[in-house]
Image (spheres, rainbow, N blue to C red):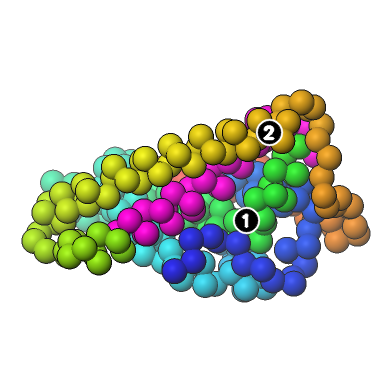
Amino acid sequence: MPIYLYLDRATALHRLHPGVKILALFTIFWSIYWLDQPLALAPIGAILLLAAQYSGSWSNFYRLRWLLLLIMFFTAAVWVIFYRQGSPLLMLGPFPISRASLEFGFGRAFKLAELIAATILFLSTTRVEEFAYGLTWMGMPHRIGFAVTLAFRLAPLFIDSALDVVAAQKLRGHDFSRGGPIARMRGYAPVMVPVFMGALRKANNMAMALEARGFGHTNRPTSLVEYRFRPADWLGVLALSALGAGSFLAYLLGYGAINVGE
């Protein structure tokens, strides 16, 4: 089972400048933040779907489909029940359900789904090295940028270590599927110690490797690959600027807000 989300494709989205990709992620988050109305969020969702189709990232969305569906379902259910605004359309037990609560609940569900989808799309088209280069290119100190990207480097390694430990325990006769949910959770207790020990060992080895390579000696280290701005990158910046400005304008005009009077 692959533990990394990056998919090596020869698409225009993959070839964009790393700084433009980071700007795209920020712009999507910015645009989603200002909108609450589900219909106002629909264009951003359509853009993400088209980008996923063009970049060939559907395999990652399929891998995480249950996460997206569960988050959308429970977020919508909770907000529909507990958002007490507007005239009730029906009663769900002691909870009044209004048009405003339905719009707000589904709007919050779409918000979270689009935020996660944008992140999946970013990780599907951007290498960790490109992410680090883009952060440094945008002016972030190298040490802070490296610390941010370190999470994307180490998390898959820790997951891989956990899968290896689980496989080793199964070969020794440990049955993780025996009993109910609580018993299964307890069954994973023997996995935690070797996983944490392996994580500490890898962190110590990485610290020694970084020290041996002179990490921190300069704030502007060189890069093996130099990325240059191309016409497609400038076009992407213009499109992202239009998207961000359009979402903020929709917020100012009240188009993306929930009408609580109904």
Q: Position of residue 89 (x, y in %)?
A: 26, 55
Q: How many marks?
A: 2
The amino acid on which the numbered mark 1 sits, given as a three-letter code, is Phe
Magenta stretch, main secondary structure class: helix
Query: Is residue 214 something one can see in this rendering?
Result: yes
Nearest the viewer among 35 and 221 is 221
Q: Residue at x 78, y 62 (%)?
A: 15
Circle 1 — which element? helix
What residue sits right under mark 1 in the picture?
Answer: 122
Nearest the viewer among 45 and 93 is 45
Q: Residue at x 77, y 67 (%)?
A: 12
Q: Which residues are magenta?
A: 137-166
Membership of 87 in magenta stretch: no
Q: Is residue 255 left or right of residue 9?
A: left
Q: Position of residue 87 (x, y in %)?
A: 30, 46
Q: Is residue 174 left or right of residue 52?
A: left
What residue sits right under mark 2 in the picture?
Answer: 212
Q: Residue at x 91, y 59 (%)?
A: 231
**Image quarter in which the N terminus is found:** bottom left
The amino acid on which the numbered mark 2 sits, given as a three-letter code, is Ala
Query: Is residue 244 something one can see in this rendering?
Result: no
Q: Position of residue 43 (x, y in %)?
A: 61, 61
Eye-nearest disc, 2 or 1: 2
